Each structure stands twice: as structure tokens, then as C-alpha cells.
Image (cartoon, rainbow, N blue to C red):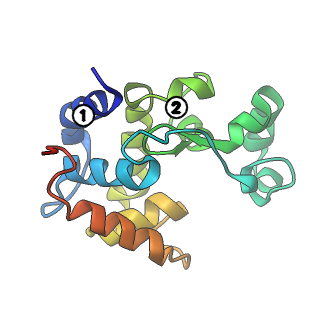
Amino acid sequence: MSLQDDLRAVIRREAPRLHAPAGIDPAQLLAALAEVESSFGLNAVPNHEPAYDEGGRYYAAAQHVRDLHKTWGSWMACSYGPWQVLFVTAWEMGFRGTPGELWTPSGSIEWVLRAMNARIFDKGATTIEQVADGWNSGSFQDKIWPGGYVKQVGDAYARPDLLDPT
């Protein structure tokens, strides 16, 4: 089974656990985010997030980030897997494994779902734009607007071939 086939299987199996409102297809949403974040898993390499590393604003502001840095070094300041879930975010959602465990679809999906539900859907997001904003910036309710990213996710979501390529 290819990585993309595994990713599609994980999406189909786990998407119903998203608290997405009517009008948002959870499987298509997860596929669109994976497409934008990692070319549907093909480029799921760790992405360093300097704001969480030593000297970054979240490092300075949060003791748990500094504590994670003591254990994991700069690996804790990276996002992983097809959805590029941030290690710190997964940790905040209850993950207690190694950064490498988040690399695969099956290793990261639980933490992606928990984060999306807690930080996006359960806070009232009702549109693809709000979901994309929240996934990229951490909250769809803040003043940060990642317009280019939001457009990319919207365009990917509109593609009918993400889960069923021809």
C-alpha cells in the first residue's frame, strides 16, 4: 500500500470523528489540508516553527514549551505528518510519544482530530475558510489572516479527485 493509499484509508476511517457542521465534508476537509500541508503526504517532512524554539515568542511565554524543549530540543518546535500537526499542539491535546510518531497518517490523525475539534469546530467554526485560518494560525478568532493559505485550502477542498484520484 502506498503512502497516499494509507492516507486515504486513514481519512475515510477517521473523518467521521470531526465535529464538522453540516455543509463541511470532514473527509474532503482532511484531504484538502493534507494536500496543502504536504502534497498529500509526499512532502511530510518536519517543518520547523521558530516561534516555539529557543528565543521564540511561545518559548518565552509558556513553561510547558520550555520544558518540552529540554527533553526534545528543536524537534519539539516542528510540525509533522501529512497535516503538519505541531508537536506542541499534539502534546497539549494529550500526546505523550516522540516527535517521530507523528510522521505517519495513523500516528498523527488522533492529534489532528483532537486539535481541530477543540480549537476550531467546538469554538464555532462553520466555514472552510475559518477552518483553514484556525489550522494555520492557531485560531480563526484572532486577527491573523493567512489569506494565501486559506485560498489554497479552499481550492484543494473544491477538487473532487483528492480522495478518489482518476
Given residues 119 and 9, the one toward you in this image is 9
Of all residues shown, which one is farthest toward the front? 166
Residue 100 image point, x, y percent? 58, 25
Residue at figure coordinates x 45%, y 52% from the top left: 37
Residue 10 image point, x, y percent: 27, 30
- Quarter assignment of residue 156: bottom left
Q: Amino acid at mark 1?
A: Glu
Above or below: residue 92 compared with residue 159: above
Using the image as rendered, state which of residue 10 and residue 158 is in the foreground. Answer: 158
Q: Please, what secondary structure does the residue beneath circle 2 have? A: loop
Q: Residue at x 30, y 54 (%)?
A: 32
Figure quadrant of residue 86: top right
In this view of the protein, which residue sits in the foreground, 3 or 112?
Answer: 3
First-in-chain label (2 vs 1)? 1
Dot label at residue 14: 1
Quadrant holding the N terminus: top left
Q: Residue at x 50, y 39 (%)?
A: 44
Residue 15 at least partly seen: yes
Q: How many badges with numbers are in the image?
A: 2
Tell me if 52 is positioned left or right of 135 in this view.
right
- In the image, taking residue 23 as reference, residue 107 lies left or right, namely right
Q: Residues within 10 Å of mark 2 (few under 14, many from 20)?
A: few
Q: Report the residue at 49% width, 64% height from top.
A: 139
Between marks 2 and 1, how big is the CA–CA gap? 18 Å
Q: Circle 2 sits on which residue?
A: 94
Q: Where, quadrant-wise, is the C terminus in this rendering?
A: top left
Q: Which mark is residue 125?
A: none
Classify 10 Å Cα crowding around label 1: few (below 14), some (14-19), many (20 and above): some
Whether residues under marks 2 and 1 lie with C-beta atoms below 8 angstroms apart, the answer is no
